[in-house]
Structures are given as C-alpha cells and as structure tokens.
Image: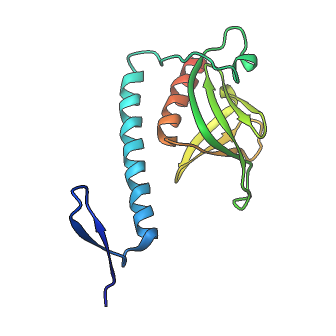
Amino acid sequence: MQLSERGRDASSNPIETSTEEGPALRDARTLAERSQADEAAAREARERLMVEPMATLTPDEDIRPHLQADEVLHVLRRHAILRGPGDERALGYGGTLYLTSRRLIHLGQVVMTVQLADVLETSIAGERILLTLRDGGEGLSLDVDQPRLLRVEMASLMRGLRA
C-alpha cells in the first residue's frame, strides 16, 4: 500500500506526493542538486581563473584587524564549521571562513589561521573540504557552502604563491 499526502501547488490545485520516498530521499536529492551546482560553479571558476585574477572583497570589521598590510580578501563563507582531525562525532566550531591572498582564517568560536603555503593537499568529502597540512599533522576539515568552488579558489591562490 502506498501512502500519499495531499498538498497544493502554486495555483492552489491539489497535488499528491508520495511519502514512500520520505525525507531522507528528498534530502539526498537536494544534496545531489547542490553538489551539481557547486561542481558547475567550480568548473566555471577554474576556466575563468586561468585568464583573469580572482576578485577581491572589501574586508568587514571582523576580519580587518586580522589582515596583514599587504594581504587581500578574496572569499568569505559564513556558517563554516571547523573540525579537527579524526573525530567525526565532534560538533566542530562555527564561524566565518575567510580566504585571503595568503591564508585561510576561521573566525568564530575559535580563531584558526592556516597559511596557504602550508596546505599540501585539498580533497572533498560530501560537503566538506579536507586539508592536509605540511607540518605532518592530520589536517582539518571545513563544512562550508560550495566546497568544490572554494577548493578551486584556494588552488588558484596557492598556484600564485608557489610561482
């Protein structure tokens, strides 16, 4: 037996939706759509950043005191969750992630700074960007909106630093 819910579409006509798929399937579909949109944005940014420099942002009052004299702000992601290595059960630390010309800076419950030159590798796991760091530590992970796009943006800046 299939259960159904009755709802209304935008024109107030009754519609039937199956509850057989349930919230988990709808959430998985939404996540897949977000991932596809993120991948498309990353692909477009990859092509664009090969021919033009990354845009700059005006620093807000939170990041301004943390910037060095010749450092430029390029990206910010609100509602970023910072997690240390190894413990997936940890809730992490909420805050805003800033990508500058030289560093990743997480401001919120904790302040964390990573020099882009110290990032050996970046990878994506779901909606997380994982960073392997030069110091031999286990790295860290960041839950952010559009992690694939952020990875491309970081790679562009890291190429510039290493050139």
Which percent across, then down, holds residue 62? 70, 24
The quarter holding residue 12 reads bottom left
Residue at x 36% of width, y 27% of height = 47
In the current view of this chain or complex, which residue is farthest to the front?
12
- The correct choice, above or below, for 22 with respect to 162 in the image is below
Query: Left or right: 10 with respect to 156?
Result: left
- The correct choice, above or below, for 73 with respect to 124 in the image is above
Which percent across, then down, holds residue 56? 52, 16
Which percent across, then down, holds residue 162? 60, 20
Which percent across, then down, holds residue 146? 49, 41
- The correct choice, above or below, for 41 with respect to 21 in the image is above
Q: How many marks?
A: 0
Viewer-nearest residue: 162 or 13:
13
Viewer-nearest residue: 146 or 8:
8
Coloured how?
rainbow
The quarter holding residue 163 reads top right
Residue at x 75% of width, y 17% of height = 65
- The correct choice, above or below, for 22 with respect to 54 in the image is below
Residue at x 31% of width, y 91% of height = 1
In the current view of this chain or complex, which residue is farthest to the bottom?
1
Query: Left or right: 8 with respect to 61?
Result: left
Residue at x 65% of width, y 27% of height = 116
